[in-house]
Each structure stands twice: as C-alpha cells, then as structure tokens.
Image (tube, grey):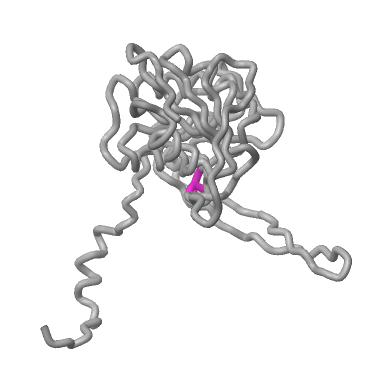
Amino acid sequence: MFLKLDSDRPIILITNDDGIDSPGLTALARELSQLGQIVIAAPEEQRSAISHAITLGKPLRFFPYPSSNSYPTYSSNGTPADCVKFAVRRLLSQKPQLVVSGINLGPNTGTNILYSGTVAGAVEGSILGIPSLAVSLDTYTDPIFSGAAEISALIAENILKRSLPAQIVLNLNVPNLPIERIKGIRITTMGRTNYNDFFEDDRGGEEYYFWLKDSSSWEGNTEDSDIATVASGYASLTPLQYDLTHHQFLDDLSDWDISTNNPE
C-alpha cells in the first residue's frame, strides 16, 4: 500500500484524536488545502486523552474512508500516533513536509498537554523528522472552527517556509471566537494545571463503576502562559520539546550519594 502524490506541492498529513468524522478535522483540511496536498489519517472513533499510546498487542487496521472531500482519507482502529506512524512508514511513498494534528475540541494547555492525543499526533510527526503542529480550540460546546483553521494555515505556511528545529513541536490553542474577534497570536510558555479531580461511583447491577470528574483550576499561571493567553482572547503558540530531561538538575543529581560501590 503506497499512495503516490504530486511531488510539485507540499504534502500535509492531518490527524486528530477526536475521530475521522470530527468537523474540526474537516475545517482544518479545507483551510490547509490552499498550501499543499492533504492526506488525512485519523482514528475511526474518539481517542481523546490517550497521550502517545501506540498499538502493540493487537492488529492495526487501516483502510480508505468514504468522504465527501477530495483528499485521500484513511481511518484506523489505532491512536493518533499510530495513524501518523503508519501513514509515514507504510502509506505514503514520500515523507510529508508537514504534520498537523487537530482541530481538537477543547484546549490542550498546561499539564493537559501530557494527556493529549492531539499533541501526541504532532509529536510523532516530529519524532519521524517532520515539522509538526498541534491545534486545539478552547471550547467543548458550540465550536467556531473557522478562526482556528485560519490561524492554523498562517502558522503552517510559516513552518513550510522556515521549517522547525529537530525535536520541536508547535502547540497552537485558539479562543472559540470568530477570526475578527481574536486579538492576535502570542508566543507562550506551557502553563500549569492544578488538578482537583475525583472519582464518582455509579452502581450498575452487581458492580460499581467509577467516573473521573474534573474540577481543575488555573490559579498561579503567569501572563505569558498558554492558559492565561487564551483566556485573554489571544491565540497561544507554544514551542514544545519531547526531550524530558531536566538539564539544569543533572549536576545536582550527580552530587547525590547513590554510588553502588561496585568494583570496575
């Protein structure tokens, strides 16, 4: 299975974690089609909060998906990271110039980034050596995808012109507003989410079920954080890295008394 495309235009691979039928994915593809050839590879159903999971213990299915758009569209039983990995390694005959994941319904700011399947789809693209962008909309109801799609195209155009450093992923979060009401784009840092979640029990028959309930707060975030920026009406653009090493602590850690005293 190899999909051959026109080599004269950039190939843009799009995925998400909301599933193949998400209107956010459709809006994103429509806007980015002005910049290059679109290929869609997305989960067959929602895979939110799955982070960077990949499928190992069961077969991965990947098949053409009937769609009203004109782009090659494929659906998978896997995760967003699976979709990007398979599309690059098995589906496409040449590496895409850009991977874009989104538009996610709901923000991926602060510590939520670590749980995000949307961000993971973009990170997988970067792992494979492809400049990548994750896009999320700051709402769970009544989404206005057009503004986020337009700003995504602006960022994508710059990535195609300038590329990105290795191991860097851009994370874009956009207020749920028409484009004319979005104040602008700010470069931000990753904020911090204060989790106050709990489990609510629900008895069904002879068994108990538990539902995770979220009551997170965002106090203490600085003005340059992604959380505060989106709340103030600006789109937030954060450069992320997947090297999780805390380099500043390396020297301190080397001073710890953790020698095993084994002979060399």
Q: Position of residue 158 (x, y in %)?
A: 34, 21
The answer to which of 74 and 263 lies nearer the viewer is 74
**Res. 231 visible in picture:** no
Q: Position of residue 103 (x, y in %)?
A: 55, 30
Question: Is residue 54 depicted above or below 105 in this figure?
Answer: below
The answer to which of 178 and 57 lies nearer the viewer is 57
Query: Magenta residues: mostly which secondary structure?
Result: helix
Q: Position of residue 175 (x, y in %)?
A: 57, 30
Q: Which residue ends up furthest to the front in the rendered image?
A: 1
Q: Position of residue 31 (x, y in %)?
A: 51, 16
**Image position of 10 (left or right of 175):** left
Q: Which residue ends up furthest to the left in the rendered image?
A: 264
Q: Quadrant of residue 87?
A: top left
Question: Is residue 113 depicted above or below 158 in this figure?
Answer: below
Identify the residue at image location x=68%, y=63%: 198
Identify the residue at image location x=61%, y=32%: 20
Any magenta on residue 243? no
Magenta residues (range): 109-113
Quarter of the picture holding the N terminus: top left
Quarter of the picture holding the C terminus: bottom left
